[in-house]
Amino acid sequence: MNVLVTGGMGYIGSHTCVQMIQAGITPVIVDNLCNANKEVLNRIQALTDVTPVFYQGDVRDEAFLDHVFSEQEIDAVIHFAGLKAVGESVAKPLEYYDNNVNGSLVLARAMRKAGVKSLVFSSSATVYGDPASVPITEAFPTGNTTNPYGRSKYMVEQCLSDLFHAEPDWSITLLRYFNPVGAHPSGTMGEDPKGIPNNLMPFIAQVAVGRRAELAVFGNDYPTSDGTGVRDYIHVLDLADGHIAALNSVGAKAGLHIYNLGTGQGSSVLDMVHAFANACGHDVPYKLCPRRPGDIAECWASTEKAEAELGWKATRTIAQMTADTWLWQSNNPNGYEK
Ligand code: NAD
Ligand code: UDP
C-alpha cells in the first residue's frame, strides 16, 4: 500500500512513517517544512534503511498536489499537515483557517481528481471542548471549542463529514488524538518545537536538560486528585500504530469512521513532572502558577470503540513516554539543529 503522508516530516508524521515502513506500507511525504527539518529524512533512513519519497510543497497548492498524484500511485492519504499552536491561533486566525481548513479542502479536491478516496485526518480531542464527564466517548457532543485551532479541526471534521454524505464512496477516518508525547526509543527522533514550547512534555524536557529554568504549572486548584490538570498522554508510537490499524481495518471501507486515540488513563501535571524526574534522574524545578485561560480540568478517552473496531490499543506506559522523551532530549539538546 502506498500512502501519501502530508506533514510527514513533523513530529507525529515522522514517527508514523517509521512505523508504516516497518509494517510494509510505503509512505510518500508531502511537507512544506514550515515546522520541520529535512534532517528527519536521514533519521527515518537510519531507522528503516528506507528514504521515503519526499515532495517539498504546500497542501494549499492544488497544482503541486496534482503533480504529486500524477507521479505516484497512491492508495490512501494521511493528512497531518497543519498548524497546531493554540495560542498562536488566537493571534493568527486567518493563517490557521487557511492552513488547516483551506489546506484540507484543496487536498480533498486533488484526491477526488486523482480518484483517491481514502483519507485519514488528524483531529483532536479539543473538538469535545470542556466535556460534561470523563471518559470521553466518540458520541460526546463536539463543536464547543474555545480557540481558532480547535475550531479549525471541528470545521474540517464537518467539511469531511458533508463530503462523505454527498459522496458515500469515500472512506473518511477522523482520528481524535488526546495528548501525544514521547519519542522514538532509539533517541534519534522526537518532538522539536520551535521557540518556547506550548505543551507540557517538551517544556518539562527542556527544563530537565537545562535549556529553561523551571516549569510553570498552570493551576493547582482544579477539582482533580492533586489540583493540577489531568490529561490522557499517549506515546507517539502507539499513536502511529493507531493510524496503521485505521488504514488496515477501515481505510479501504467506504464510510465515515471516527475514533479516539488515547490510553484511557488520566495523569496530572505533577504526575508527569515526577515521572520525568524518575526518567532523567534529577528533580525538575517547577512553580505553581495561575490557570492558563481556556484550559479544562480533566480529559481522557474512552478507548472501547478503537479497541473493538480497529483492534488497536495503546500499550506504552508513562515511564516509557518520559524515558524516551529524555533520551531524545538529552541526545539532541537542540532538536534536529546540529
Ligand atoms: P508538526 O507541526 O510537528 O507537524 C505538522 C507538519 O505539517 C510539519 O512538518 C509542517 O512543516 C507541515 N505543514 C504545516 N502546514 C503545511 C502545509 N500547508 N503544507 C504542507 N506541510 C505543512 O505537528 P504534529 O504534532 O506532528 O501534528 C500533526 C497533526 O496532528 C496536526 O494536524 C495537528 O494539529 C494534529 N494534532 C497534534 C496534536 C499534538 O499534540 N501534537 C494533538 C492533536 C492533533
Ligand atoms: N501545562 C502546564 N505548564 C505548561 C504547559 C502545560 O502546567 O508549561 C499543563 C496544562 O495546563 C494542561 C496540561 O499541562 O493541564 C497539558 O497541556 P498541553 O498544552 O500539553 O496540552 P493540552 O491538553 O492543553 O492540549
Image (cartoon, rainbow, N blue to C red):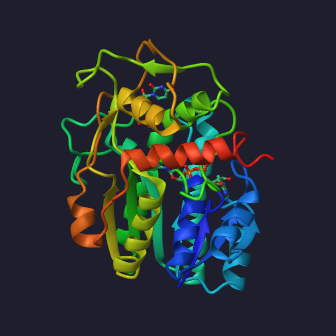
Q: Is residue 196 visible?
A: yes
- Which of these two is toward me, 214 or 165? 214
Give the side of residue 110 with respect to residue 299, left or right.
right
Quarter of the view holding residue 194: top right
Residue lying furthest right: 338
Quarter of the view holding residue 135: top left
- Relative to 251, say whether 173 is above or below: above
Total numbered labels: 0
Residue lying furthest front: 281
Say which residue appears at 66% left-offset and 61% top-offset: 59
- Which of these two is toward me, 163 or 313? 313
Say which residue appears at 31% left-offset and 42% top-offset: 128
Say which residue appears at 21% left-offset and 53% top-offset: 139
- Which of these two is toward me, 4 or 311? 311
From the top left corner, tell me how far across and down residue 280 is, in percent.
52, 36
From the top left corner, tell me how far across and down residue 132 is, in percent.
20, 35
Q: Quadrant of ligand 2?
A: top left
- Relative to 250, say whether 285 is above or below: above
- Relative to 234, say whether 95 is above or below: above
Give the side of residue 87 with respect to residue 335, left or right.
left
From the top left corner, tell me how far across and down residue 168 is, in percent.
35, 77
Q: Is residue 10 visible?
A: no
- Relative to 98, say whether 110 is above or below: below
Say which residue appears at 59% left-offset and 73% top-offset: 4
From the top left corner, tell me how far across and down residue 127 is, in percent.
37, 44
- Which of these two is toward me, 20 or 105? 20
